[in-house]
Image (cartoon, grey):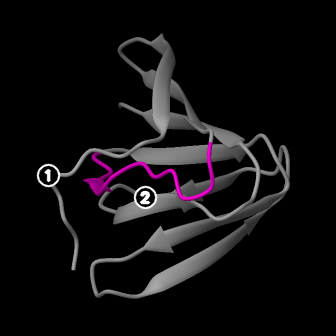
Amino acid sequence: MCKSNEPGTAVGTVQVENDRVRITEWRFKEPGDNTGWHTHEYDYTVVPLFDGVLEIDLPDGSRAIAELKNGVPYYREAGVHHDVINGNDFECAFVEIELLQ
């Protein structure tokens, strides 16, 4: 089950924020770095900056593996609750674009 109050080790840097969007770069410097448990309040798009995998811990205790390609985006609706983990043996990053309206 999730541990919602524990901070992650990945670094989120907000690059753009206004009334319509928030754009954050998430950087995972080491294997196993994670975002920490969180729930997305807004619909969002992720643009990976690497080829590799992210491991996704889910509230039911399962772990999903997401295979990502550099520059190939994906979209999710608000409400997703998870912890995202660097499943690679190298530093990786992605850009998250939240649709605030």
Q: Quadrant of residue 81?
A: bottom left
Label 2 environment density (alpha carbons within 10 Å; few <14, some 14–19, many ≥20): few
40 part of magenta stretch: yes
Check residue 5 in the rendering and tell me which mark sits there, or answer none.
Answer: 1
Kindly identify the residue that appears in the image at 27 percent across and 78 percent down.
59
Mark positioned earlier in the residue sequence (1 or 2): 1
Q: Quadrant of residue 32?
A: bottom right
Kindly identify the residue that appears in the image at 46 percent across and 52 percent down.
34
Give me the C-alpha separation between circle 1 and circle 2. Answer: 23 Å
| In the rendered image, the vertical position of residue 50 relative to residue 85, given as above or below | above
Which of discs 1 and 2 lies nearer the camera? The answer is: 1
Kindly identify the residue that appears in the image at 48 percent across and 59 percent down.
84
Q: Quadrant of the N terminus?
A: bottom left
Kindly identify the residue that appears in the image at 62 percent across and 46 percent down.
30
Magenta region: which residues? 30-41
Give the amino acid type for the residue marked by disc 1 in the picture.
Answer: Asn
Q: Quadrant of the C terminus?
A: top left
List x then y, in percent, for residue 43.
42, 48
35 part of magenta stretch: yes
Badge 2 is on which residue?
77
List x then y, in percent, for residue 48.
73, 46
Circle 2: element type: loop
List x then y, in percent, for residue 75.
59, 55
Circle 1: element type: loop
Give the amino acid type for the residue marked by disc 2 in the picture.
Answer: Glu
